[in-house]
Amino acid sequence: MSPSTVKPLIIAGWILLALEALFVVVLAVSKNVGDDAAGRGMATGFAIVLGPLVLATGALLFWGTRGGPQAAFWVGFCMVASPVAYGAFTFAGGMFDTVDRMQGQAQYGRFDDPALTRLARAIDQQDTAAMRRLMVDTKPDWTARDRRDQTILGHAIVRAIDDYSGTSRVECVRILMEAGAPPAVDVIKPLATASSVSEHNLIYHLAAVHNPSALEVLELVLAAGATANAVDEAGRPIYFSAVLSVLEILNRHGADFTLLDTRSDRLQWNALMNAVYLKSWAEARFFLQQGLSPDYTAPDGSSARTILAEVDPPGSTYYGDEDTAHTAFIAAFKKSAPGR
C-alpha cells in the first residue's frame, strides 16, 4: 500500500485512539451512580477494563508506525476502528429494520382497487365522513384483499383492536358492516407463525384480545351473524379458553355451552370442569349459572366435584378479586351441589 494511502489511515487511527482514551478518562473520573454496589462501580469498572486495551492499541500503533512490522499497525488500527465499525453496522441494521417495518406497514390497506385503498386510508385516519362518501357511488368488493391478505373489513377490525386508547375506531367497523360487509371468519390474515390456525379465526382472535375495542367488535360481528359457537380445528369450543367478559357476549348471542372438550387429557369434560381445573372462579360460576351440572361425570371419572376437591383443598388462600370470585363460586357451587 502506498504512503499516500497509509498516511490518512495513520492519522485516523491516532484520532480514534485519542477519542477512545478520552472516553476512558471520562469513565474513570465520572461520579458512579446506582442503588447497589454493582451500579456504583460500573463506570470505574469499565475504565479499568478498557484502559489497558487503549494502552495496548496505542503501543501497537506506535510500534507499527515507527519501524515495527506493518502487521502491528493493522492490528492496532483494527482494534481502534472496531467500535466505529460496530456502531456503523448497528446503525445500518437499525435503519434497514425500520425501512422493512415501514414497507410492511405500507402494505396494509393497499388494494389493487384504488377506491378500496382510499377507503382504507380513510379508516386509518378515522374519517367516517369520507368513508361514507367513498361508498356512495361504488359498492366495495367485500372479498378483495390487500397486500397483507386482509379484506377491507379485516383492515378496519385490525386497526380498531390494535388501538388500546378507546373504542372510537370501532365506528369504522360499524359503518362497513352497516354497508353490508360480511363478518367472514377469514377477514383477517392468519399469521404464518401461529401455532393454531384458529388463533386467527375472526372470533377466536377477537376473544383473545382483551381490550374494550375487541369486545365491542366481537359484539358487532356476532350480531351480524357470525357464530357464537366457534370451535378450533380440533373441535374445541372457544369458551373453554375465554374470559368472563367474552363469555357474557357469547351468551347474549346464543352460544351453546353444553359442548364438551376434545382435548385428549380432558376428553369430554364440560366447560364447568375445565374452569374449575384452571381455578377460573368467575368463569366457573358463570357456567354454573348457565345450568352446567356439577355432577356430570366424564369418561375418565372426573367431575366438577372431584376436580374442585383436588385443586381447592380446605385452607386454600386467595387474595383480592380472586378471593371475591372464589367465595362467590363456592356459594353458588354449594347451592347447586349440596354436600361440597
Image (spheres, helix red, strand yellow):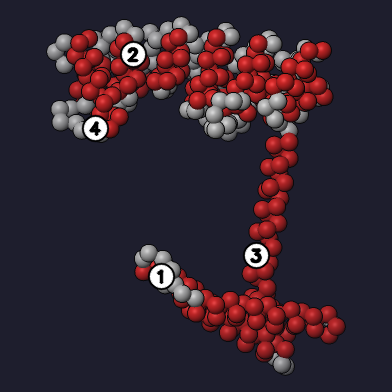
- Where residue 115 sits, quadrant-wise, is top right
The residue to which callout 2 is attached is 287
Labels 1 and 2: the sequence-earlier one: 1
Residue 332: image tag: none
Q: Residue at x 28, y 32 (%)?
A: 320
Q: Note whether 253 is above or below 279 in the view shown.
A: above
Dividing the image into 4 quarters, which one contains the C terminus? top left
How far apart in space, not on screen, are marks 1 and 3 (Cα)? 27 Å
Amino acid marked by disc 4: Tyr
Amino acid marked by disc 1: Arg
Q: Residue at x 70, y 83 (%)?
A: 14
How far apart in space, not on screen, are marks 4 and 2 (Cα)? 21 Å
Amino acid marked by disc 3: Tyr
From the viewer's perspective, tell me whether residue 305 is left or right of residue 42. left
Tags 1 and 2 touching, CB below 8 Å: no
Tags 4 and 2 touching, CB below 8 Å: no
The residue to which callout 1 is attached is 40
Nearer the viewer's eye, disc 3 or disc 2? Answer: 2
- x, y percentage for residue 55? 58, 84
Tags 3 and 4 touching, CB below 8 Å: no
From the viewer's perspective, tell me whether residue 50 is left or right of residue 246. right
The residue to which callout 3 is attached is 86
Nearer the viewer's eye, disc 1 or disc 3? Answer: 1
Labels 1 and 3: the sequence-earlier one: 1
Labels 4 and 2: the sequence-earlier one: 2
